[in-house]
Amino acid sequence: MQYNKRLASVSDATRYFFKSFFYMSKMIERDRKIVDEKFVERIMLTVTQVNGCKICSQAHAKRAFEVGLTKEEISKMLSDEKDEVSLNESIGVLFATDYADERGRPNQNAIDRLYQTYGRRNGKAIIGACAMIMMGNTLGIAFDTFKKRLKGIKTGSSIFRELGIFMIFIVMLPIEILTFVLGFIINC
């Protein structure tokens, strides 16, 4: 049986953490009429579906339900069926798929289209949602592979990769929290 989760390298994890720091304040600045909680959760579910993080799928499915997505919508998002996505959110959801497929390095044309569709501020908030869930997926998948390692299940990962990602998280989390709090204070 093949382990079908997207394994990030330690350098990918570091890049995802730094990107999430940068874009965290952009999530706060978004126009909530355009990029509301439902839209954010659709983005989170899309990226998680591409990466295959079980932990994030469960957490964001619960959150999506809490903000008003139906169980059917959630199920379709997690099975890569996007027919429930409204036309005004489709560009953002397609961008989220591309973002995850390209490991957080979307092409400039995709970014430009995102900005043309939603404006720079909201486009950056969408990128922020993608960056944050990529970071979460990386940590969730590292945790999952570590648990499987303890049970003797092979995943294609290495103990050094998993511990490296955990160390990055331990070092970066206080910085990320501080960044979030300062961003919130500055934007209030």
Image (tube, rainbow, N blue to C red):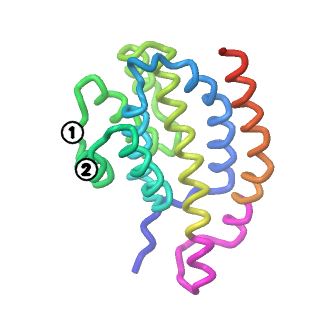
Extent of the magenta region: 145-164
18 is higher (above) or lower (below) than 12:
above
Residue 84 image label: 1
Camera-side residue: 65 or 173?
Answer: 65
Q: Main secondary structure of the magenta part?
A: helix
Q: Residue at x 21, y 39 (%)?
A: 84
The answer to whether residue 97 is seen in the rendering is yes
176 is higher (above) or lower (below) than 56:
above
**Residue type pointed to by label 1:** Glu
Residue 62, horizontal then vertical, whole percent: 41, 51
Please tell me whether residue 158 belongs to the stretch shown in magenta.
Answer: yes
**Residue type pointed to by label 2:** Lys
82 is higher (above) or lower (below) than 188:
below
The answer to whether residue 98 is seen in the rendering is no
The N terminus - image quarter: bottom left
Q: Residue at x 46, y 25 (%)?
A: 108
Of helix, strand and loop, which one carries label 1? loop
Disc tally is 2
Q: Residue at x 49, y 37 (%)?
A: 130
Residue 125 image label: none
26 sits left or right of 74 in the view: right
- Judging by the rendered image, the residue that carries numbered circle 2 is 76
Please tell me whether residue 123 belongs to the stretch shown in magenta.
Answer: no
Of helix, strand and loop, which one carries label 2? helix
Q: Residue at x 53, y 75 (%)?
A: 155
- Residues at marks 1 and 2 touching, judged by CB atoms closer than 8 Å: yes
The C terminus - image quarter: top right
